[in-house]
Image (cartoon, helix red, strand yellow):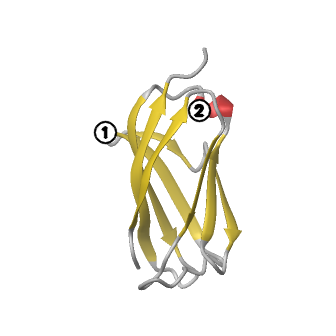
């Protein structure tokens, strides 16, 4: 499968955060997420986990086309310190094959206090 590097995304502390994307299997084929397990983490630059799937909602928008949405609510984002982070998403497909399919940079900025 193919690991995608998403564009740098920026969010403000205390806002709802939404990231959408499409996951791909071999080549340019969309990955079928039917019965897949998705794990996601946002880490600081020292690899400490700041957020994970217990603090975010991962929604499979269209399983056959591999479309997902990750959301973090405003109460959860309010606990994040402004700074540079990275995220990583791993999928275990219906056959049990596990692969990291999404990585990228996230910048968190101070918002209205």
Q: Earlier in the sequence, mark 2 or mark 1?
A: 1
Quadrant hosting residue 66: bottom right
SS for dot 2: helix
Residue located at (65% from left, 77% from top): 35
Residues at discs 2 and 1 in contact (Cβ within 8 Å):
no
Residue located at (59% from left, 26% from top): 78
Gap between marks 2 and 1 measured at Cα: 18 Å
With 15 as the anchor, is 50 left or right in this view? left
Residue 13: horizontal and vertical position, in percent? 56, 27
Residue 7: horizontal and vertical position, in percent? 43, 54
Residue 70: horizontal and vertical position, in percent? 61, 53
Q: Mark 2 points at which residue?
A: 77
Q: Name the residue under label 1.
A: 45
Rendered-image quadrant of the C terminus: top right
With 99 as the anchor, is 13 left or right in this view? right
Q: Nearer the viewer, residue 30 or 78?
A: 30
Local packing at callout 2 (Cα closer than 10 Å; few below 14, some 14-19, many 20+) is many
Residue located at (54% from left, 78% from top): 93
Number of numbered markers: 2
Mark sitting on residue 17: none
Residue 63: horizontal and vertical position, in percent? 67, 75
Residue located at (66% from left, 37% from top): 16
């Amino acid at each position: 499968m193919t690991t995608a590097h998403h564009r740098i995304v920026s969010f403000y502390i205390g806002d709802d955060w939404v990231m959408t994307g499409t996951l791909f299997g071999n080549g340019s084929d969309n990955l079928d997420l039917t019965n897949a397990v998705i794990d996601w983490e946002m880490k600081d630059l020292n690899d400490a986990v700041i957020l994970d799937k217990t603090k975010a909602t991962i929604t499979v928008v269209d399983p056959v086309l591999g479309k997902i949405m990750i959301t973090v609510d405003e109460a959860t984002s309010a606990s994040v310190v402004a700074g540079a982070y990275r995220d990583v998403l791993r999928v275990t497909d219906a056959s049990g094959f596990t692969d990291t399919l999404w990585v990228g940079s996230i910048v968190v900025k101070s918002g209205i206090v």
